[in-house]
Amino acid sequence: MPRPAVLVVSQIAGLRAAFEARGLAGPWIRWTETGEDPALQLQSCDVLVGEPALLAPLVASAPRLAWLQSTFAGCNQLLDVPRRDYTVTRLAGCFGPDMGEYCTLHILALERQYEEQRRMQSRAEWAASRASAGFTYRRLSSLTLGVLGLGDIGSEIARVAHHGLRMKVIGCRRDPTPRDTDASAGVSRVLGMDGLAELFASADYIVSVLPSTPATRGLIDGSVLSAAAASRRDGAHSPTKPPVLINVGRGDVIGESTALEALERGWLGHFVSDVFAPEPLREESPLWAHPKATVTSHNSAVTQPEDVAAAFADNLERFERGGVEALREGGATFDWEAGY
């Protein structure tokens, strides 16, 4: 049986070497540099591999396209193209540990006042007392992490926080029905989306890994954050300091103006964001210089070429064995209706 015709369009350094290391080479798989017109290759390809933003303009010119393998977890750019008669597989199962490390970095930096320690070092200043009010910290075992979105990435972040940092973990998702993965990740309680304010009132840190969908855009708004703050003031929940929001999902879950208002009003104690809408974050944004904001450039988890090669090899085996139906059984297919 002939192998499918594959065209790879990607900017990921080292991807071709990673493919070849797995034996993914030969006349059936072709590569094109970004910017080169791949019109001839597109006419005959069955499979596209690459970043969704690069592939979205090409799918209309690939009449035989049956399967698209994304090199990213998110595939939102494909929703802007009318054609949907092909199957998309996301890159999944590999970003959770990296994002867990990112969240750990920022939780520890804030609790141990890393930035202030660096400023003191730059001044050659020794703290007069280690127990001074300025350098008290909370043990992580006394803190609660809320995870907004308990898919494979959110569950891994929960696992790192609970099993690695000894934090209590609660979660929030569309269907709050308990799952086996909740217990193994150390999630003690799962709220539905109607419990969003309760999540912000109950947790010291909240990590959002939500995708961008009509239901999630602007989900974290002033009404949610102010209600959570009021609940804390009334003593209905134990945390006394405003929570910290860490956003590693999609930027449009909270508007820039909402984040700024929340920081100014004390609804949030700090805002850490790796994602924005739009990207890059505009140069004149007040978030860049805000003392209670940490901005990073969408790099909490960067695609590794070996992960793409491994995912493609597994999915290729399924595709050659049973076509797109076998791909859909693999569990990492993009849901056109849900948007993730």
Image (tube, rainbow, N blue to C red):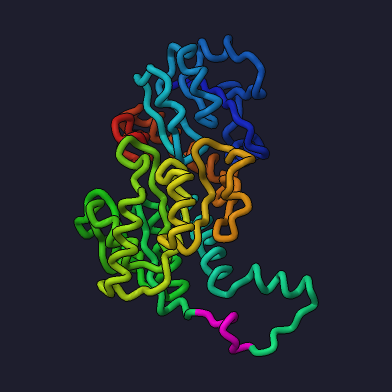
In the depicted view, which residue is nearer to us: 323 or 248?
A: 248
Q: Using the image as rendered, state which of residue 11 and residue 291 is in the foreground.
A: 291
In depth, the one of 222 and 191 nearer the eye is 222
Q: Which residue does the image show at 35% across and 54% down from the upper left?
A: 148
Residue 327 x, y percent position in the rendering: 36, 34
Residue at the right extreme, as displayed = 124
**Residue 38 placed where, x, y %?**
60, 15
Residue 328 is left or right of residue 77, and the answer is left
Instruction: From the image, give the main secondary structure of the stretch colored magenta.
Output: loop
Visible residue check, residue 157: no
Determine if the magenta segment contains residue 132.
yes
Residue in view at x 25 percent, y 51 percent: 193
Residue 330 position in % (x across, y down): 34, 40
Q: Which residues are magenta?
A: 130-137
Task: Say left or right for 240 vs 43.
Answer: left
Q: Residue at x 63, y 36 (%)?
A: 12
